[in-house]
Image (spheres, rainbow, N blue to C red):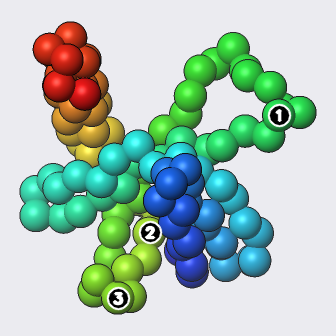
Amino acid sequence: MKEERNDYNEEENIVELVDDDGNTFRFEHLMTFEYKGGWYCALTEVKDAEEGEDDEGEEVAIYRIEGEEDDERLVQIEDDDELDEVFAEFCAQYEDFEDADEAAALDGKE
């Protein structure tokens, strides 16, 4: 499933994706990262207040970024091996990112 449009609200860090069928989904942008020469975007779905929190925790969706800067598309990763590799890289980079934020807060730099 290719995503046809993505609208980004920078203040809230929210991305709205519209699929091929016209369905809109809201995601919080976690991070964009490079891996093996490709660019990827990690998102987590924004839950409505009525949905509440589930016991499973946050699910992370990772998309490959394709196209040029003015015409970028988020594309699902179909290959399970690639997805596993990219997800492991996301986990490593996100942990480093979180550790840096926590360290900056402790140092009073944030």
Which callout, 2 or 3, points to the residue nearer the camera?
3
Q: Report whether 43 appears left or right of 36.
A: right
Tell me which numbered mark, 1 or 2, is placed earlier along the sequence: 1
Q: Residue at x 66, y 43 (%)?
A: 46
| Residue 41 position (above or below residue 52) | below
Q: Residue at x 41, y 58 (%)?
A: 63
Q: Residue at x 10, y 57 (%)?
A: 36
- Disc 1 marks which amino acid? Ala
Q: Report whether 82 appears left or right of 109.
A: right
Please state, as top left, top right, bottom left or bottom right, where the N terminus lies in the image.
bottom right
Local packing at callout 3 (Cα closer than 10 Å; few below 14, some 14-19, many 20+) is few
Tell me which numbered mark, 2 or 3, is placed earlier along the sequence: 3
Q: Disc 3 and disc 1: Cα gap in Å?
A: 34 Å
Q: Residue at x 54, y 72 (%)?
A: 6
Find out whether the residues at labels 3 and 1 contact each other: C-beta distance under 8 Å.
no
Circle number at residue 49: 1
| Residue 71 position (above or below residue 39) | below
- Label 2: which residue? 75
Circle number at residue 70: 3
Please state, as top left, top right, bottom left or bottom right, where the C terminus lies in the image.
top left
- Disc 2 marks which amino acid? Val
Q: Disc 1 and disc 2: Cα gap in Å?
A: 28 Å
- Disc 3 marks which amino acid? Asp
